[in-house]
Amino acid sequence: MKISQAMIVKNEEKNIEKALAWGKGIVSEQIVVDTGSTDRTVEIAKSMGAKVYHFPWQDDFSLAKNFAISKCKYPWIAMLDADEYFLEEDAKKLKYFINLVDKDSDIHGLATALVDLKNEDGEIRSINRTIRIFRNRKDILYRRAIHEQLELFNGKDFTAADCSNELSVYHTGYIDLCDSQKTKSNRNLNIIENQLSQNPHDFEMRIYLANEYAVRKLWIRALEEIRLFYKDIPEKYNTRIDIISKGICTHLIALSEMEKAGEDSEAILREMEEVVEKGKKIIPDNADFSYLYGRALYSQYHKYDKAISALLDALDIANSDSETTLSAYFGSDIFSCYKMLADSCFQVGDTEGAVRYGTAVLQYHPNNLDTLLVLLCAFYKKEAEWEDVKKFLNKIYGDEITSIEELARRVGYRIP
């Protein structure tokens, strides 16, 4: 099965080589549509064998992407942005998954995970779901000027096979986002505001506008916008649950940031509780709402009993068979959930819970000294003998157990 890789670019000389490299040996052609680069983007793309076309920028991502689609000649298209890429192992699996659905005309694309990276070290900011792989058909095009989405222009719903557990697109665009030229120019902000002026009840654009303010840390403006989107959610929203989830999470994050700024903490906490309840009614199987609430209860309010309840609720939702949405924040930060549970349990005197959740963290992150300290304190409070503690920790640390002894002495253990 032959695949066309396509992208629209402008001044992406930092990213273009990596954006094209993953497709070498996988795709049969690489289409780059330049919308006005003034750096070496076009030169690098041509040197890598891509076909480069020029399209004047018209403040409309869909127009540019649909032009790129028109230049593709193979049955499937991989439309990743210049700051996105597949890892080598996932790129090699791409044709396999396309072949699985190719004969089913009711499947129009593949949904993959979208892993937003926080920094150059590969730390994950969030995990969402996206559609970057789709059929090359005249009735499949992008809609909307920004935060564009694929649509089937024959009156039917666009349907994608969910491969998010098997395929991941990595996105570097959030690294240093606040300092990026795109943010400083207000390009996206201006397009979103223009779209909302034409359709004030577009709840998705309302969420994206709130996110633009959140990126700029303008939390009051973000809250003003995000509080408005709920009333415009359509009755049938099953194809929009990912963006609705994003909006609810933005609401919770903005509220937690307002608390940091010294706003009325009790009023904010009440609103967070209301948002979580509202979110669970709309999307009952998303763990993010309880997780973000639990995180705020733990780190900002120090309400450890309530934090334990919220965090355990997030774990229960994530572990349930009914989960159909990707929990963007919980999924990328699950060990923080266990860390907070370990410390919260210790704070309320539940040493068994502290040991249980602390052990879960250290089995995968043995160098996490904060959790190790909580675990040692829990054992000490239980009056466990050091030899028994040493035997327990030996399962995790092996020969390195001697390096733990100094920390144990600080806790209070008398070790010869």
Image (cartoon, rainbow, N blue to C red):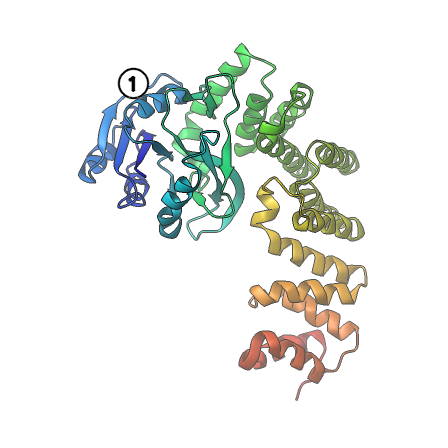
Q: Is residue 208 left or right of residue 93?
A: right
- Name the outermost residue toward the top: 198
Query: Could you tell me residue 283's position as x and y percent?
Result: 68, 34
- Quarter of the image with the N terminus in it: top left
Is 299 drawn above or below residue 189 in the view shown? below
Q: Nearer the viewer, residue 292 or 93?
A: 93
Is 215 drawn above or below residue 166 in the view shown? above
Q: Nearer the viewer, residue 17 or 132?
A: 132
Query: Could you tell me residue 23's position as x and y percent?
Result: 30, 43
Query: Looking at numbered disc 1 in the image, what kind of residue is underneath it?
Result: Pro
- Name the outermost residue toward the front: 103
Query: Could you tell me residue 40's position as x and y percent?
Result: 23, 35
Is 315 drawn above or below residue 38 in the view shown? below
Q: Quadrant of residue 367?
A: bottom right
Is residue 401 visible in the rendered structure shown here? yes
- Quarter of the image with the C terminus in it: bottom right
- Name the outermost residue toward the bottom: 416
**According to the image, label 1 marks what residue?**
56
* Picture residue at 41% right of the left edge, 25% below the top: 185
Q: Is residue 62 left or right of residue 330?
A: left
Is residue 86 visible in the rendered structure shown here? no
Is 94 drawn above or below residue 364 in the view shown? above
Q: Quadrant of residue 381?
A: bottom right
* Picture residue at 65% right of the left edge, 28% below the top: 223
Q: Is residue 146 left or right of residue 412?
A: left
